[in-house]
Image: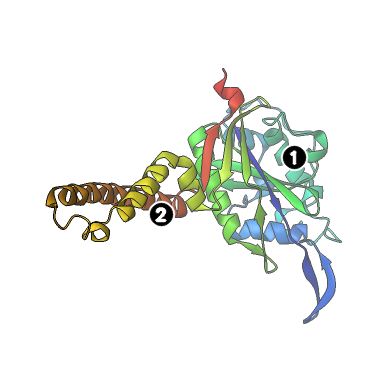
């Protein structure tokens, strides 16, 4: 299965010596490569990794898988950047193109043009998840994460979202696409959609809308039925006043319990839940 989402890049001012010029441009491929290298997810010894190793990582352990015809050992991982000019870096490197072949073989939805624009291949070791970064236009990159198990793929995607949301490129934050799509293994249709949570309060109300409505009604009744407001009306008849007090206590307690539950959900969204996953409508209909 694959998780796919995009990231919008912001224009940044260019540097010349120690001064910033008025000309702006998008971050270069070198900037993006350095960003993911800083995450610690870059593959080591690319020259020694074979296509069968990549196939094993994605779960296909057929060691008879033929090697890709694309092979050029003239560039090593250490001098990829040094031997390319004008920002044309790893997506021109045959090493990355060769290693990307078995990854793209698992992604039938990827067009041929995209396959030649992979600028980075990485591995989230904690979840044993491979990912590839594709850049078709200067302002947007597309990330595709690959794993056979849905739970590990979702955890890896959450980790990637967390790192990217906290990162910056040349002083500019990254704008994450709010929608994440998970494709069924070996097919090109979406089985799960994910939404990045940007407003925890809104997500709490959307997911617990019944509790939110009951809380609002209970709180309103608790305020309206405060006994102090009606003390003068029932001064000569204590029975209705006692009933009002008990009613106020009941609705106040209900409102307090629901408030505690909603606050707990809010902090859960804010601290631990970065993505809301939902089975796609097409998958539900099966």
- Which residue is painted at 46% across and 54% down in the image? 270
> Residue 31 in the image: x percent, y percent?
72, 61
Where 214 sits versus 149, above or below? Answer: below
Please name whichever residue, 247 or 47, is drawn nearer the observer in this view of the structure.
Answer: 247
| Image spot of residue 13 (x, y percent) | 79, 71
> Closer to the N terminus: mark 1 or mark 2?
1
Whether residue 55 sits left or right of residue 118 in the image: it is: left
**Tag 1 secondary structure:** helix
Q: How is the image coloured?
A: rainbow
Cα distance between the residues tagged 1 and 2:
45 Å
Q: Quadrant of the N terminus?
A: top right
Q: Is residue 188 left or right of residue 219?
A: right
Q: Which residue is mark 1?
A: 98
Instruction: Name the quadrant containing residue 103.
Output: top right
SS for dot 2? helix
Q: Give x and y (percent) for residue 120.
A: 70, 49
Task: Pick whichever, 64 or 150, lies toward us.
Answer: 150
Q: Which mark is residue 161?
A: none
Identified at 74% across, 40% down, the residue is: 98
Q: What residue sits right under mark 2 in the picture? A: 267
Q: Mark 1: give few (<14), some (14-19) or many (20+) Cα within 10 Å.
A: some
């Amino acid at each position: 299965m694959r998780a796919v989402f995009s990231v919008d890049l912001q224009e940044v001012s260019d540097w010349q010596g120690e001064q910033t010029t008025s000309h702006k441009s998008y971050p270069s491929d070198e900037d993006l490569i350095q960003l993911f290298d800083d995450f610690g997810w870059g593959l080591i010894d690319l020259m020694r990794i074979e296509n069968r190793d990549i196939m094993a990582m994605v779960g296909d352990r057929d060691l008879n898988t033929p090697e890709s015809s694309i092979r050029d050992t003239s560039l090593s991982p250490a001098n990829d950047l040094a031997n390319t000019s004008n920002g044309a870096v790893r997506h021109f490197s045959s090493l990355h193109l060769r290693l990307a072949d078995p990854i793209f073989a698992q992604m039938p939805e990827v067009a041929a043009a995209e396959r030649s624009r992979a600028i980075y291949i990485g591995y989230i070791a904690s979840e044993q998840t491979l990912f590839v970064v594709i850049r078709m236009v200067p302002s947007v990159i597309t990330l595709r994460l690959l794993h056979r198990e849905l739970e590990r793929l979702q955890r890896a995607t959450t980790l990637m979202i967390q790192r990217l949301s906290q990162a910056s490129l040349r002083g500019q934050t990254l704008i994450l696409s709010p929608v994440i799509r998970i494709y069924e293994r070996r097919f090109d249709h979406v089985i799960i959609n994910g939404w990045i949570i940007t407003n925890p309060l809104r997500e709490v109300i959307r997911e617990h809308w019944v509790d939110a409505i009951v809380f609002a009604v209970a709180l309103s009744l608790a305020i309206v039925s405060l006994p102090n407001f009606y003390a003068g009306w029932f001064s000569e008849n204590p029975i209705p006043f006692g009933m009002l007090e008990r009613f106020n206590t009941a609705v106040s307690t209900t409102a307090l319990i629901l408030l505690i539950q909603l606050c707990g959900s809010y902090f859960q969204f804010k601290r631990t839940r970065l993505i809301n996953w939902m089975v796609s409508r097409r998958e539900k209909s099966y």
